Image (cartoon, rainbow, N blue to C red):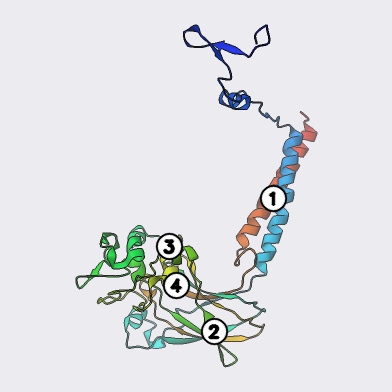
């Protein structure tokens, strides 16, 4: 600071005085010069013990609330792939599922043990199905899904790129292996309606699948992979395909099939008429039907609540250990 009270200055390049502020606001100058005041907390034993206690006091109630919400979700899981094979084909399930002349109808009975409040979500679950395989994930064309036959470069879709010299829409192994089991529910001799609209992400329907793109030359080859698509309906409206195309990260996954928008009472028996079309037998996969309600936290998932409780309990236990050590050997 100058003796006459002027602004601070320093010697710059070639010995010329330069203002420390250089026209900058003081706070900005202090920030750029790293001279702002900083908080440097001293972690005393008291502070450490209090922090662990606070974390435990927050995490344990959150975990209990999350676990209670998960426990309130009513879920019915029914595996049907093994039971829906006729007795004479039990030794050769692959031949049964590949023979299109054999009817694949099957009936299962679900006993509801607790009141299920609408909406009731219907999922199909596949186990030992690796949708995350690198070659499988790459076998698609996002540009073709959006623009259809206007987009010609579908080399990424191999081996389901062309059929009899014509392009396939949608191309690729993901679309080719579309899940095609169907489910119908009957309660007290009345069929329960399944709402299959709005089961896919809105962003996928609006921005990833074209509204003017229709299936073309799909599942016309000698080897049929999975479900077929209605060539009169644009891809943006075929939501079962959109749900299937969002690949799962783990080999066991669930995908939304639809919603039942009426309550199911306790002790009701639901008759499920299903078509066992999808081939999981050739790779040792499993198929399950899942009916589930939801809570404010989502579906049934005890892991989140247990994790919160475990972390909170660990913090409280650690704080008690630190407290005993501090009492025994004060700092």
**Above or below: residue 215 compared with residue 193:** above
Label 4: state its secondary structure.
helix
- Numbered disc total: 4
**Above or below: residue 196 compared with residue 320:** below
Which numbered disc, 4 or 3, marks the residue closer to the eye? 3
> Disc 4 to disc 3, how far (Cα)?
13 Å
Label 3: state its secondary structure.
helix
> Disc 4 to disc 1, how far (Cα)?
42 Å
Question: What mark, if any, has residue 239 been given in the picture?
Answer: 4
Which numbered disc, 2 or 3, marks the residue closer to the eye? 3
- Image coordinates for residue 214, horizontal then vertical, percent: 34, 73
- In the image, 105: left or right of 293? left
Residue at the disc numbered 1: 312
Q: Are marks 4 and 2 in contact (CB under 8 Å)?
A: no
Q: Earlier in the sequence, mark 4 or mark 1?
A: 4
- Look at 40% across and 86% down and name the residue there: 104
Question: What mark, if any, has residue 193 been given in the picture?
Answer: 2
Q: Earlier in the sequence, mark 3 or mark 1?
A: 3
Q: Earlier in the sequence, mark 4 or mark 3?
A: 3
- Look at 27% across and 62% down and name the residue there: 154
**Above or below: residue 309 compared with residue 236:** above
Label 1: state its secondary structure.
helix
Q: Earlier in the sequence, mark 1 or mark 2?
A: 2
- Look at 61% across and 24% down and name the residue there: 30
């Amino acid at each position: 600071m100058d003796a006459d009270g002027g602004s601070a200055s320093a010697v710059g390049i070639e010995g010329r005085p330069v203002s420390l502020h250089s026209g900058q606001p003081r706070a900005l100058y202090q920030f750029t010069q790293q001279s702002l005041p900083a908080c440097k907390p001293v972690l005393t034993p008291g502070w450490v013990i209090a922090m662990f206690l606070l974390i435990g006091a927050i995490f344990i109630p959150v975990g209990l609330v999350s676990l209670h919400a998960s426990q309130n979700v009513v879920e019915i899981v029914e595996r049907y792939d093994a039971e829906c094979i006729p007795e004479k084909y039990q030794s050769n399930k692959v031949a049964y599922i590949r023979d299109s002349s054999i009817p694949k109808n099957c009936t299962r009975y679900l006993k509801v043990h607790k009141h299920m409040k609408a909406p009731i979500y219907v999922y199909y679950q596949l186990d030992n199905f690796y949708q995350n395989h690198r070659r499988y994930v790459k076998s698609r064309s996002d540009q073709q899904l959006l623009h259809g036959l206007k987009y010609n470069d579908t080399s990424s879709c191999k081996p389901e790129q062309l059929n009899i010299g014509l392009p396939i829409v949608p191309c690729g192994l993901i679309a080719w292996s579309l899940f095609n089991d169907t489910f119908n529910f009957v309660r007290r001799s009345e069929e329960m309606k399944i709402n299959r609209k709005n089961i896919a992400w809105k962003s996928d329907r609006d921005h990833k699948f074209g509204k003017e793109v229709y299936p073309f030359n799909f599942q016309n080859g000698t080897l049929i992979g999975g479900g077929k698509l209605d060539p009169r309906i644009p891809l943006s409206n075929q939501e079962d395909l959109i749900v299937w195309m969002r690949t799962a990260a783990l080999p066991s996954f669930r995908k939304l099939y639809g919603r039942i928008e009426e309550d199911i009472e306790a002790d009701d028996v639901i008759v499920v008429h299903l078509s066992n079309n999808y081939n999981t037998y050739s790779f040792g996969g499993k198929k399950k039907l899942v009916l589930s309600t939801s809570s404010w936290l989502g579906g049934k998932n005890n892991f989140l609540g247990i994790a919160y409780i475990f972390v909170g309990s660990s913090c409280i236990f650690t704080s008690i250990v630190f407290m005993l050590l501090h009492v025994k050997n004060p700092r």
